[in-house]
Image (cartoon, rainbow, N blue to C red):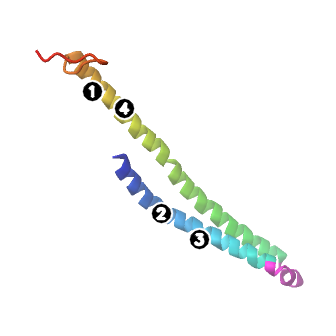
Amino acid sequence: MIIAGSLVFQRRLEPLYAKVRESVADLSGALSANLAGIATIKSFTAEDRERDRIERVSAAYRETNLRAIRSSAAFVPIVRMAILAGFTCTLLLGGWKTLDGDLGSGSTPCSSS
């Protein structure tokens, strides 16, 4: 159940992280272009325009990354809850079977009479 859920969840996260990679590429490209062309930007007094553009690209990256992280952060608690549910079911079922005499406790074999 956990493996199947993980595969489904991974397929759901894949497009989100693809968008994150695209956003970071956009940000990296914009920063690289600005650093390489700093003299041109200054000569045309375009610092404010470029700063605003970098802020927009950076905000888009931040939002895209936050969406992916929020979705990804939900996965660990879900897996832990599934493990806890399995452990609880095993404990309850084993306890009931032990109380009914169908299962021995510890190393005591159960009687088959």
Q: Earlier in the sequence, mark 3 or mark 2?
A: 2
Residue drawn where x is 29% and y is 21% of the image: 95
Residue drawn where x is 40% and y is 38% of the image: 83
Separation of disc 4 and disc 1 at Cα? 10 Å
Query: SS class of the residue under badge 3?
Result: helix
Query: SS class of the residue under badge 4?
Result: helix
The stretch in magenta equals: 36-46
Q: Mark 4 points at which residue?
A: 87
Query: If the image is split into quadrants, where does the C terminus sit?
Result: top left
Q: Mark 2 points at which residue?
A: 14
Which amino acid type corresponds to the residue marked 1 in the rendered image?
A: Leu
Q: Name the residue under label 1.
A: 93
Separation of disc 3 and disc 4 at Cα? 41 Å
Q: Earlier in the sequence, mark 2 or mark 4?
A: 2
Pointers 2 and 1 in contact (C-beta within 8 Å) = no
Q: Residue furthest right?
A: 43
Alpha-carbon neighbours of circle 1 within 10 Å: few (<14), some, or many (≥20)?
Answer: few
Separation of disc 2 and disc 4 at Cα? 30 Å
Which amino acid type corresponds to the residue marked 2 in the rendered image?
A: Glu
Separation of disc 2 and disc 1 at Cα? 38 Å
Pointers 3 and 1 in contact (C-beta within 8 Å) = no
Percent across and percent down for residue 109 are 23, 18
Percent across and percent down for residue 82 are 39, 40
